[in-house]
Image (tube, helix red, strand yellow):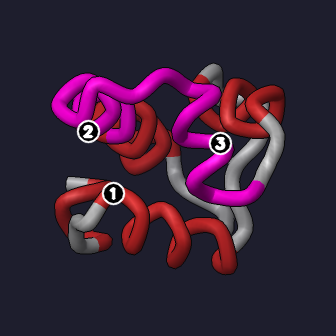
């Protein structure tokens, strides 16, 4: 999924906030998503973006809405 820069920054910030609220590490988050921690790290450092399949998984795993994730 291609984000513009504003959405990318908010996406990264909000995922980090949700992880902090849940007390989860990136490794725990990756396991919950069924992916590698290196993949999550790439998303959170902005070098890659998750595909739509993973955006849907992220919303489900973090128990949030897409709006909460990018706004």
Q: Are marks 3 and 1 in contact (CB under 8 Å)?
A: no
Q: Which residue is mark 3?
A: 30
Residue located at (78% from left, 51% from top) = 35
Query: Of the residues under marks 1 and 2, which one precedes in the sequence?
Result: 2
Q: From this view, report whether residue 34 is shown above or below residue 60.
A: above
Identify the image quadrant of the C terminus.
bottom left
Label 3 CA crowd tier, 10 Å (few <14, some 14–19, many 20+): some
For the residue pair 11 and 5, the one nearer the viewer reads as 11
Q: Secondary structure at mark 1?
A: helix
Q: Quadrant of residue 26?
A: top right
Q: Are marks 2 and 3 in contact (CB under 8 Å)?
A: no
Identify the image quadrant of the N terminus.
bottom right
Q: Distance of mark 2 from mark 3, alpha carbons?
A: 14 Å
Q: Which residue is mark 2?
A: 18
Q: Which residues are drawn in magenta?
A: 15-34
Judged left or right of residue 11, residue 66 is left
Q: Which residue is mark 1?
A: 62
Q: Is residue 14 magenta?
A: no
Q: Are marks 1 and 2 in contact (CB under 8 Å)?
A: yes
Residue located at (52% from left, 52% from top) = 4
Q: From this view, report whether residue 36 is shown above or below residue 41.
A: below
Label 2 CA crowd tier, 10 Å (few <14, some 14–19, many 20+): some
Q: Secondary structure at mark 3?
A: helix
Q: Distance of mark 1 from mark 2, alpha carbons?
A: 7 Å
Residue located at (73% from left, 58% from top) = 34
Q: Give the x, y percent position of residue 37.
A: 75, 31
Q: Give the x, y percent position of residue 38.
A: 82, 27
């Amino acid at each position: 999924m291609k984000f513009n820069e504003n959405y990318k920054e908010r996406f990264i910030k909000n995922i980090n906030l949700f992880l902090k609220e849940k007390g989860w590490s990136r490794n725990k988050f990756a396991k919950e998503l069924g992916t590698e921690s290196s993949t999550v790290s790439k998303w959170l450092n902005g070098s890659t973006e998750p595909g739509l399949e993973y955006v849907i998984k992220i919303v489900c795993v973090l128990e949030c809405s897409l709006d909460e994730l990018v706004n």
